[in-house]
Image: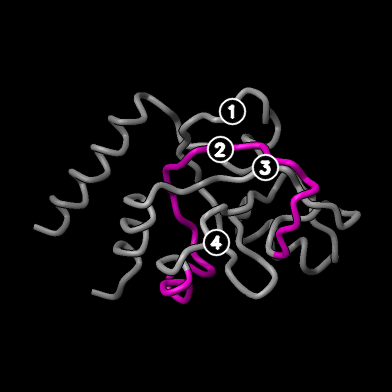
Amino acid sequence: MRCLVAGILLLQACTSLGAVPVTTPAQLNSEPERYNGQRVLVRGYVLLGTNSRALYQSREEYDRAVASQTSPPENCLTILNNDEFLWANASLLRNHTVVVAGTFTTRDPRIVDLQACLDTEGNIVPTGVMIDEASLHEAVRRLQPR
């Protein structure tokens, strides 16, 4: 029954997005003008902590960035949600790859966000995704132990 409900919720999310393919942070960041204000499905590795609130291209890319102390900015997308639900479920979401629906946006890089993605020179990467509340709840539900 749980699988049926999850399938229906995923189908509803996909239907509301039309035939939108799953994208990655690098794909979205490569054409920010094209995607600005658009609803997207994005797959990324979740980083949530004191210094980060982001979807990263992949666990492997993140590990490479940590090892080399450099991070190509196109591999990172700031999660614009900064609410109680996100942080209450940070331990479930953190260090997992998820597919979520939301709205991609470019933003003013002068806005200070201490958890935003940074480029190799320490400047804020001016892109992010506001994850839909239902999609965030579904991602948490899928990660909960059964």
Secondary structure at badge 2 equals strand
Q: Residue at x 33, y 58 (%)?
A: 137
Q: Estimate the spatial distance between the alpha carbons at disc 2 and disc 3, rounded to whole Å.
A: 7 Å
Give the extent of the magenta segment: 87-114
Upstream in sequence: badge 2 or badge 3: 2
Q: Do tag 3 and tag 4 residues touch (Cβ < 8 Å)?
A: no
On screen, residue 75 versus residue 71, left or right, reads: left
Q: Estimate the spatial distance between the alpha carbons at disc 4 and disc 2, rounded to whole Å.
A: 16 Å
Q: Do tag 1 and tag 2 residues touch (Cβ < 8 Å)?
A: yes
Numbered mark located on residue 104 in the image = 2
Residue highlighted by disc 1:
35
Upstream in sequence: badge 4 or badge 2: 4
Residue highlighted by disc 4:
46
Q: Residue at x 27, y 43 (%)?
A: 10
Type of the residue with mark 2: Phe
Upstream in sequence: badge 3 or badge 1: 1
Upstream in sequence: badge 3 or badge 4: 4
Instruction: Categorize mark 1 by other alpha carbons within 10 Å: few (<14), some (14-19), many (20+).
Output: some
Q: Estimate the spatial distance between the alpha carbons at disc 3 and disc 1, rounded to whole Å.
A: 10 Å
Residue highlighted by disc 3:
127
Type of the residue with mark 1: Tyr
Disc number lying in front (1 or 4): 1
Type of the residue with mark 4: Val
Q: Position of residue 73 (x, y in %)?
A: 77, 48
Type of the residue with mark 3: Thr
Q: Do tag 2 and tag 3 residues touch (Cβ < 8 Å)?
A: yes
Q: Position of residue 103 (x, y in %)?
A: 49, 38
Q: Estimate the spatial distance between the alpha carbons at disc 3 and disc 4, rounded to whole Å.
A: 16 Å
Residue 113 or residue 134, whichever sits in front: 113
